[in-house]
Image (cartoon, helix red, strand yellow):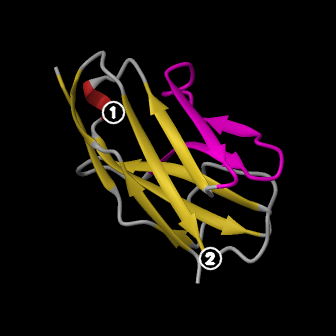
Amino acid sequence: EVQVVESGGGLVQAGGSLRLSCAASGFTRKDYVIGWFRQAPGKEREGVACISSDDGSTYYADTVEGRFTISIDNAKKTVYLQMNSLKPEDTAVYYCATREFVNVCTIVTRPYDVWGQGTQVTVSS
């Protein structure tokens, strides 16, 4: 059974940084994609960034491009989201999600079939 577990959330002041981790397990193949998503109170879940295990290709939402960096440690099956220059509008519960047997990632929620429980990120002004 494939599982993902997020960690690394917390409270940070605007302009600060946090690094989230997504530890995955249970894959039966080497080709999978992992995405980071977030959901603020009263808003829909939105895609933040994603990465492919196959070639490390990435994709970012416009709102985080240049501030967030997604990376993967294939040996540990762990994906990281380095978040710099954080803004109060980045406050949300951050989720990671995964899907096997695909090589091209997307920040659309629908294709992902395994989700973590989420980790809270709060950015104070």
Q: What is the x, y in percent for residue 106?
A: 68, 50
The quadrant where residue 114 appears:
bottom right
**Magenta segment includes 95:** no
Residue sitting at x 80%, y 62%: 31
Q: Amino acid at mark 2?
A: Gly
- Which residue corresponds to mark 2? 26
Residue that appears at 41% across and 56% down: 6
Q: Label 1 neighbourhood size at 10 Å, few (<14), some (14-19), many (20+)? A: many
Q: Residue furthest bottom?
A: 1
Give the numbered dot on residue 90.
Answer: 1
Which badge, 2 or 1, comes first in the chain's sequence?
A: 2
Q: Quick check: can you spot residue 111?
A: no
Quarter of the image for the C terminus: give it: top left
Against 94, is 112 above or below?
below
Looking at the image, which residue is at 62% across and 76% down?
26
Give the quadrant of residue 61. Answer: top right
Q: Nearer the viewer, residue 113 or 109?
A: 113
What amino acid type should be assigned to the residue bearing mark 1?
Asp
Instruction: Report x, y in % for residue 94.
Output: 38, 49
Question: Between 27 and 98, which is closer to the camera in this rendering?
Answer: 27
Alpha carbons under labels 2 and 1: distance apart: 30 Å
Q: Is residue 70 above or below residue 62?
A: below
Q: Which residues are magenta?
A: 46-75
Membership of 71 in magenta stretch: yes
